[in-house]
Amino acid sequence: MTQKRKLRLTTRFQEIFELLSRSVEKDGCFIWKGADRKRVKFPVMVVQISSDQSVIQVRQSSIHESIQTGEVLYLKLPFRDAALKTRVVERVGAKLTLEFPVQLALEEGRKNPRYYFHPSEEKNAQIRTLINRAKVLPERLHNVLVCDISKGGMAVFVPTMSRQFFDVKDQVRLTSLGIHRFDAVLRGEVLFKVPFDVKGTLANRSGYKIGIQFDQELDQATLERFLAKRNLFSITDEQIVRDENFRNQVVSHMAGIRKTLSGKKAFKDLFEVFDRARAENHYLKQHVHLLCQVMSGLGTKLGWISERSVDKLIYVAYLHDVRFTNFPHLARIQSKREFEKLKAGLTDAEQKAFLEAPMYAAELARMDLESYPDAIRILEQQKELPDGTGFPHGMSASFIAPLSALFIVSHYFVDYVIDHPDWTAKDFVKTYQHRLKGQYFQKALRALVD
């Protein structure tokens, strides 16, 4: 009897991105049509992942005319029998542009599952390096960022200044994992040390990735506590949108709208600069990504939009912060009230950019002959609040359009999720239900928890 292969589905962006990155220019990749993996496979090579991580480019070893734009394909990667479902965005000769996947299936070859973290999740641990007589270095306690972990070991990021304390075969001791401190000694041995860069929520950091194997398994209860607050990247799961096909369609539409916008002559230069800002500021990229999906899911749940009008909300999400191209940190300021508290520490140019942002985005949409109905109004009202304290017009709830209310609620919700790793929709509603009064705002809030 053949033992059934153990497969695991992952929707973790960092894990998917890491496996795709390792597959670039590697042999052993294949594509095929249909879910049956026994069908004819075509060898390909992954040649590039786009800078905004929205598409993958692969090159066929020979041209297969049967593969067309819009077609659903499966891509097999050369590591751990990993495979993903994607769609052809564009075909130019032997080169295919594929959608970045929302999930990936892989054979779990390890004894224990490994859990991956994005740097913005800030999963921290403390490790003590023990006395190393060969290097004559004292014992030292290091605060490290956890890249991944299993019951049998972990990989951590350490800054360049700490690299001399970690070498292969060195002995270390794990003293804490998140808020959990170890009473008993949990020792480990360094298996590898490689240069490694991370892009966090505050700044890019260069250093080293250190692999550590534990001398005994981490107990399950401690591991589960450490994993418990990993909700940032699961915002698009069934807590908000139960229909997985719909979630996948939204991601597909996002790639299309983003490509269309960056291809417009009036927006091209602006988006090139903004893309660089997003690459350096993780908040901007993740914020827009989540905002698209929350608005689409919540709007559909309310019955205010249809599948055909999802593109309008995605369009608005991509345009709403473009005034902050040169000031990405301003995107974190939620309201005029918060702006007034921070105003003294901002330059005249920064103050001007923040106050101009809604009208600036609305004017861009007005200049776009292919703009969507209601997009201009949503962008213009994006910073209004139902109590009249918003801007630029100080509107009250009765003058704010339903889709503008949807945008405002979704925007506050996404920022709440990013700022609160242990978020729940109920906690958000409790916090904001007294600030976001008015018929349409209250309907949107109720829909989050219904």
Image (spheres, rainbow, N blue to C red):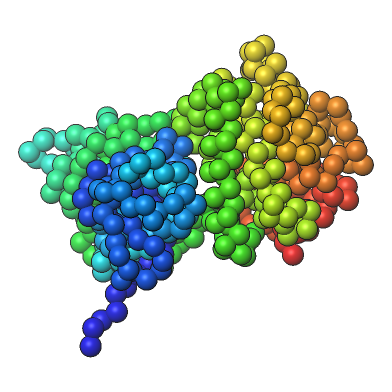
Identity of the residue furthest to the right in this view:
398
Which residue is at a point 37% across and 32% down the rendered structure image?
205
Using residue 437 as the reference point, say whether residue 57 is left or right of it: left
Q: Split into 4 quadrants, where in the image is the C terminus?
A: bottom right
Which residue is at a point 47% across and 55% down the rendered structure image?
71
Which residue is at a point 32% across and 44% down the rendered structure image?
94
Residue 24 picture location, percent across and down: 28, 44
Residue 153 picture location, percent across and down: 27, 58
Identity of the residue furthest to the front in this view:
65
Using residue 136 as the reference point, say whether residue 255 is left or right of it: right
Question: In front here: 417 or 20?
Answer: 20
Q: Does any portion of residue 323 appear in the rendered image?
A: yes
Residue 441 picture location, percent across and down: 82, 48
Question: In front here: 147 or 19?
Answer: 19
Residue 280 picture location, percent across and down: 46, 29
Question: In front here: 337 or 79?
Answer: 79
